[in-house]
Image (cartoon, rainbow, N blue to C red):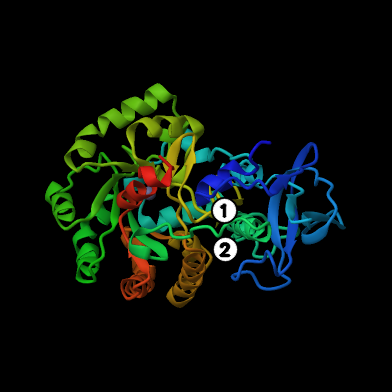
Amino acid sequence: MTDPCPELARFWRSPPGERLSVQAGERRAGRVVSLSLSDELRPPWLPSGQAIPLWLEHRVGEASGRTLATFAEDGRTHAAVVESSGRVVFCFDPDETIASILNEAYFTPRRPIHTYVPLPYQLVPGSLRLRLFQWLVKPTPDSPPGVLFPSWPIDGSVETLRFMYRRALAIAGAPALESAHWPNGKRSAFAISHDVDTAQGFRLIREVAAFENDLGIRSTWFIVGDLFGIDPSVLDDLRAQGHEIALHGDRHDNTIAYRTSGEIERRLDAAARTTARWDVRGFRSPSLLETPTLRRVLRERFVYASEVPDTEIDSLIAPRRGCGTCFPFRREGSLEIPLTLPLEDKLIMRGMNEAAILEHWRAKAAWVREVGGVVQLSIHNEPHLLSKCRGAYAALVRDAAADATVWRTTLVDLADWWTRPAHGNS
Ligand SMILES: [Zn+2]
C-alpha cells in the first residue's frame, strides 16, 4: 500500500499513516469550495462554524462512515473526511491541494504592463510611485461578490489541512506528532526584512538599525545591487552588528523575472561584488515579481528566496494571490520563506492610518504565533512609506522583543535551521 500524504508526513516527520487513506474523485476544473470541520478536526484558531475557502482540483471522492468534515460546493454538501472502523478517509487529496496552493496554481499571474518598459525607480518620487502603484494594481473593492480565495489578511487553508492531518492520525490511533520546529523549544519564529529600494532608503539604514540594535534584534536587509554612490561602510557595520545583507535584484526595474535564464544569470553576475563582500545568501525579487525561470536560477545561487506572501490582495500579478502558508517551503527546488504580515504599502494604499496598520499586523502576528509559523514583517526602508507606519513598526518589534516564546532570527539563519539534515527539508 502506498503511503498517503507523503508531503504532510515529511512536514511533520511523522511515521507512515497506514490508517489513513485518500480517495479523491477524478480530475476536474479547479474551483473554490468551502470546507467545514467538526470539532474533532477543527484547529483552535478557527471559530466553530466558520468555513475555510479551499482550492480543489478533483471531484470529491465517495466514502461512507462518520463525517468529520464537509465541503460545500454549488449549493451541495459532500463528505470531505470520514472515519470508519478506526480508519480515516480523506475524500480529496490533501497533499495535492497543498501543493497547488503553495505553488499558486489557482490563478494565472499577469505580467504587469510596466515591466515591458523598465521603471527608473530611483528617479520617480516616492509619493508618485505609490500613486502609480495604486493605478497599476487597481485595488479590488472590500467586499467583491463570491467566495474569495485566498482569504485575507489571514488565509488558513494550508495550515488547516496540516492540522487536520495531525488530528486524523490521532483519531486513527497513530502516535502523537512532534510539533516543535524551532530552536530551544521556541513556539514560533519572528524575522524582520527591510527592502531598500533607493538611495533615499539607504540613507535611513543606520537610524533604523540603531533602533533594532537597542532591542537586541538582528534583521535582514534586501539591498539593490547597483545602488550608485552608496557608502559600503553602512553595510559593513550592519554585518558587524549581526544583521544579514541579502540581494533585492541587481536593479529595481521590476524586469529581472521576465528575462531568459541566461539574461538573469548575467544580471546576477553583475551584482557579484555585492554578494561576495557581504556574504549574501538570500534573494528577493523587486516588487515580488517572480517566474519559474527566475526561481530555477535562484535555486543554484542562493540558500533561500523570500518573495511570496502567504496571502495578498492588490498584487501586481493578480487581485488575490499567496502560498497559503506561514512556514518555509520549496518552489522549483528553491527554499521560500514567505512574507506573512500584510505589506505596509498595501495597507497605506487602502487609506489605513498607523493605528489600523498596527491592529492588522498584531492580529496577523497573533494568528501566526498560534499556528507556530514564521511572522515575517517585511517593510520598506523608503521615507515615503516609513514615515506613515514607523510607530506601528516600532510597536510590533517591541512586542516581539518582549516575547520569550518567539525565536527572533534573520532569514538566513532561519533557512539554515529549516534545511539542516535533521529536518529533512534540504
Ligand atoms: Zn523593492
Label 1 lies in ligand 1 vicinity (Cβ under 8 Å)? no
Residue 120 visible at all: no
SS of the residue at dot 1?
loop
Compare residues 280 and 78 and report the one nearer the observer.
78
Q: Which residue is mark 1?
A: 324
310 left or right of 58 in image: left
Mark 1 Cα shell of 10 Å, populated few (<14), some (14-19), many (≥20) = many
Figure quadrant of the C terminus: top left
Task: Please say if 190 is above or below 403.
Answer: above
Q: Which residue is mark 2?
A: 154
Q: Quadrant of residue 150?
A: bottom right
Q: Position of residue 190 (x, y in %)?
A: 37, 62
What residue occupies the far top of the structure in this picture?
262
What is the distance, in whole Å, between disc 2 and disc 1 at their CAs?
Answer: 9 Å
What residue do we see at 32% from left, 76% from top? 402
SS of the residue at dot 2?
loop
Label 2 lies in ligand 1 vicinity (Cβ under 8 Å)? no
Q: Position of residue 22 (x, y in %)?
A: 72, 44
208 left or right of 39 in image: left
Compare residues 3 and 48 and report the one nearer the observer.
3
22 left or right of 234 in image: right
Mark 2 Cα shell of 10 Å, populated few (<14), some (14-19), many (≥20) = many
Which amino acid is tagged 1?
Answer: Gly
Figure quadrant of the N terminus: top right
Which amino acid is tagged 2?
Answer: Ile
Disc sitting over residue 244 in the figure? none
What residue do we see at 73% from left, 59% from top? 35
Of the image marks 2 and 1, the number of the one nearer the N terminus? 2
What residue do we see at 46% from left, 34% from top? 333
Q: Quadrant of residue 380?
A: bottom left
